[in-house]
């Protein structure tokens, strides 16, 4: 068994003891520490549901998900979701239409139901990958739907709306954070207007899916559901700070873009256990209150610029 396998086994035993005989899981420092060290796959869906508030929503709205599936559907919404079906993890047997236990119908159902539930968002590219990951972990359409609602409606507001104001705002916030926590990189990036949209929009909108290794993404999501969206900034800042020498060698816009593609690959991100320790140490202090304040300032800045 490899070293990480040993870590997983040890975490699994500790989590089983923590959850033994508990119908309800309270948020506290012990659980937070456990989450940061990784949730075993057998408990992951349950912890995501509880920590995000999705479980409470599911219990408060019995039958709601299924009512969305039987209502009259918007043909435009159906068409745009159908277009993305074959693009969703094409190499994963679970999402191939010919597979014995294909998740493609479940994926379509979750996206269609969510599009009707949140008409302001409908469907946006990137949501298919998120729903796919949720189905892999929960193996349940209704739970995946409510986790989508927690992510898109609460944790990442306005990321997937037509104007994508939340996404644009967070790209600006990251730019300001980099100026403070990696000033040399911040200085370099000011030479290229609009650079953050080019290099990190996919990181944020796909929540690092197909950007970082699968196990690393799942570990990030453990913390995303428990601690909120500040985790996305911690990951981005760690990648940037850790790779400052490579980034600073860039001499052109193309160099910067290529560098940001390459820094997500390699041993640093594959060793998810060490990587996750780094994201809570490398960027230093980063509270949700700080992020909220920075978001307010950046959002106003964007609104003013776009109204000109």
Image (cartoon, helix red, strand yellow):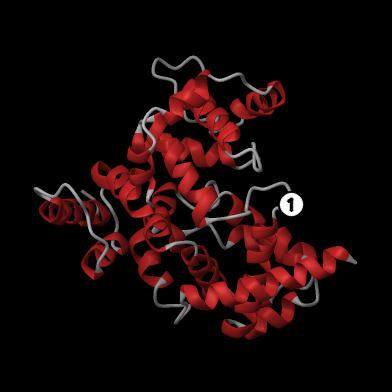
Identify which residue, 133 or 158, lies in the foreground. Answer: 158
**Front residue of this view, candidates 145 and 208:** 145
Is residue 245 depicted above or below 271 in this figure? below
Packing grade of label 1 (10 A; few <14, some 14-19, many >=20) is few
Tell me where residue 82 sits by quadrant.
top right
Secondary structure of residue under mark 1: loop
Left or right of residue 185, residue 151 in this image? left
Q: Is residue 93 visible?
A: no
Q: Residue at x 57, y 71 (%)?
A: 240
Work out whether 236 lies above or below 261.
below
Q: Is residue 31 visible?
A: yes
- The x, y position of residue 47, in whole percent, is 29, 50
Image spot of residue 229 (x, y percent): 49, 62
Residue annotated with mark 1: 163
Q: Position of residue 26 (x, y in %)?
A: 23, 59
Placement of the C terminus among the 4 image quadrants: bottom right
The structure residue drawn at horizontal position 69% and vertical position 53%, both measured from the top left corner, is: 164
Residue at 69% x, 23% y is 79
Residue under the point 50% across and 56% down: 155
User: In the visual, does 15 lie left or right of 149?
Assistant: left
Residue 130 image point, x, y percent: 51, 42
Q: How many marks overall?
A: 1
């Amino acid at each position: 068994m490899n070293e990480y396998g040993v870590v997983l086994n040890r975490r699994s035993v500790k989590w089983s003891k923590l959850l033994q005989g508990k119908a309800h899981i309270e948020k506290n420092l012990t659980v937070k520490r456990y989450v940061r060290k990784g949730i075993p796959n057998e408990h992951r869906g349950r912890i995501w549901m509880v920590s995000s508030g999705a479980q409470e929503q599911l219990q408060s709205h019995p039958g709601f998900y299924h009512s969305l599936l039987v209502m009259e559907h918007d043909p435009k919404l159906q068409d745009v979701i159908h277009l993305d079906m074959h693009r969703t993890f094409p190499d994963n047997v679970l999402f191939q239409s010919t597979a014995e236990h294909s998740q493609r119908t479940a994926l379509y159902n979750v996206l269609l139901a969510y599009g009707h539930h949140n008409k302001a968002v409908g469907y946006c590219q990137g949501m298919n990958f998120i729903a796919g990951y949720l189905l892999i972990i929960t193996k349940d359409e209704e739970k995946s739907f409510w986790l989508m609602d927690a992510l898109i409606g609460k944790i990442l507001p306005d990321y997937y709306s037509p104007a994508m104001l939340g996404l644009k705002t967070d790209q600006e916030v990251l730019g300001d954070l980099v100026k403070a926590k990696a000033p040399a990189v911040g200085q370099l990036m000011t030479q290229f207007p609009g650079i953050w949209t080019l290099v990190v929009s996919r990181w944020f909108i796909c929540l690092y899916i197909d950007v970082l290794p699968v196990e690393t993404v799942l570990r990030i999501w453990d913390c995303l559901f428990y601690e909120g969206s500040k985790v996305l900034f911690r990951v981005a800042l760690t990648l940037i700070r850790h790779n400052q020498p490579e980034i600073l060698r860039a001499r052109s816009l193309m160099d910067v873009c290529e560098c940001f593609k390459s820094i997500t690959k390699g041993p640093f991100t594959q060793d998810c256990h060490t990587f996750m320790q780094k994201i809570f140490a490398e960027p230093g202090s980063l509270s949700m209150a700080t992020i909220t304040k920075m978001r307010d300032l950046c959002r106003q800045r964007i609104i003013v610029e776009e109204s000109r």
